[in-house]
Amino acid sequence: MLTKPLYFSQVQLYMAYLDLEQCVFTALNKDTSELYFELIPFDSEAAQKYSDRAVQIIKACENGETVPCISNDPSIFKCKMCGFRNICRNDER
Ligand code: SF4
């Protein structure tokens, strides 16, 4: 889980808002079809940190501020697959 901070923050926020003390993270290895399970304990400090970060982003958007792009290259994989590309990159796909 530590190698995927995005999933870690996601499950911490879910547990916070669902009032859970732990959850089971499940992943499928697409090459081998092997399933991976990991018991994740709730981390209230992490959940608060990620929640605060989300509030900062929402407030920045409400104030018309833009957050920095992850790259100057719009052809990188994350930007190509991003649902906000049309806003961020002014891309009319
Ligand atoms: S296109 Fe998406 S991933 Fe890329 S910088 Fe913009 S918001 Fe971030």
Image: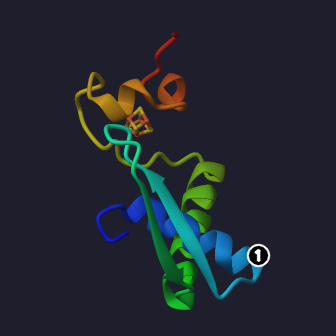
Residue drawn where x is 54% and y is 30% of the image: 83
Residue 5, quarter of picture: bottom left
Q: Is residue 51 visible?
A: no
Dot 1, crowdedness within 10 Å: few (<14), some or many (≥20)? Answer: few
Q: Which residue is mark 1?
A: 18
**Closest to the observer: 35 or 74?**
35
Residue drawn where x is 47% and y is 67% of the image: 37
Question: Disc 1 marks which amino acid?
Answer: Leu
* Ligand 1 falls in quadrant: top left
In-image side of 70 versus 64 (left or right): left
Question: Is 24 rendered above or below residue 44?
Answer: above
Residue 20, quarter of picture: bottom right
- What percent of the width, then of the height, locates residue 71? 25, 38
Residue drawn where x is 37% and y is 30% of the image: 79
Q: Secondary structure at mark 1?
A: helix
In-image side of 3 versus 29 (left or right): left
- What percent of the width, then of the height, locates residue 91? 46, 16
- What percent of the width, then of the height, locates residue 22? 61, 83
Question: Is 63 rendered above or below residue 83?
Answer: below
As drawn, the residue found furthest toward the right would be 18
Residue drawn where x is 23% and y is 28% of the image: 73
- What percent of the width, then of the height, locates residue 63? 62, 52
**Closest to the observer: 90 or 41?**
41
**Closest to the observer: 61 or 13?**
13
Residue 14, quarter of picture: bottom right
